[in-house]
Amino acid sequence: MAKPMLNSEITCPACGHKKTEIMPTDACQWFYECESCHELLKPNSGDCCVYCSYGSVKCPPIQAGDSCCG
């Protein structure tokens, strides 16, 4: 099995600011504060975390074909 990609570029839907972050492999990230406009991002309905909603790469469990967050 391929190693999951851990870098994901989050794009804030409020202001368009982009930042590359390293995703955690042992936890879900449900909240993310944009460093530009300070909007608090939460996952969209049906997504497990902010990386699946706003990131350029889905979170490691989803990349592996598993469910995220239990």
Image: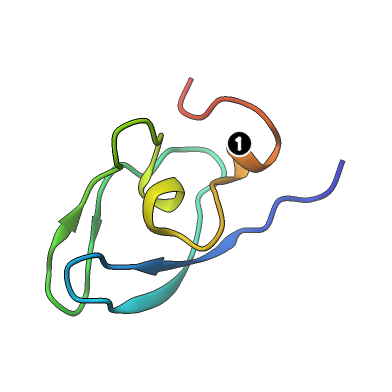
User: Is 29 left or right of 69, judged from the image as shown?
Assistant: left
**Which residue is nearer to you in this view: 62 or 35?**
62
Q: Quadrant of the N terminus?
A: top right
**Which residue is nearer to you in this view: 41 or 69?**
41
Q: Is residue 16 above or below residue 4?
A: below
Indicate the amino acid at tag 1: Pro
SS at mark 1? helix
Query: Residue at left 24%, top 65%?
Result: 13
Q: Is residue 19 above or below residue 49?
A: below
Snapshot quadrant of residue 7:
bottom right
Snapshot quadrant of residue 38:
bottom left
Q: Position of residue 50 (x, y in %)?
A: 36, 49
Query: Residue at left 43%, top 52%?
Result: 51
Q: Position of residue 56 (x, y in %)?
A: 51, 63
In this figure, what is the number of numbered marks?
1
User: Is 50 left or right of 5, judged from the image as shown?
Assistant: left
Which residue is disc 1 drawn over? 61
Query: Residue at left 68%, top 31%?
Result: 65
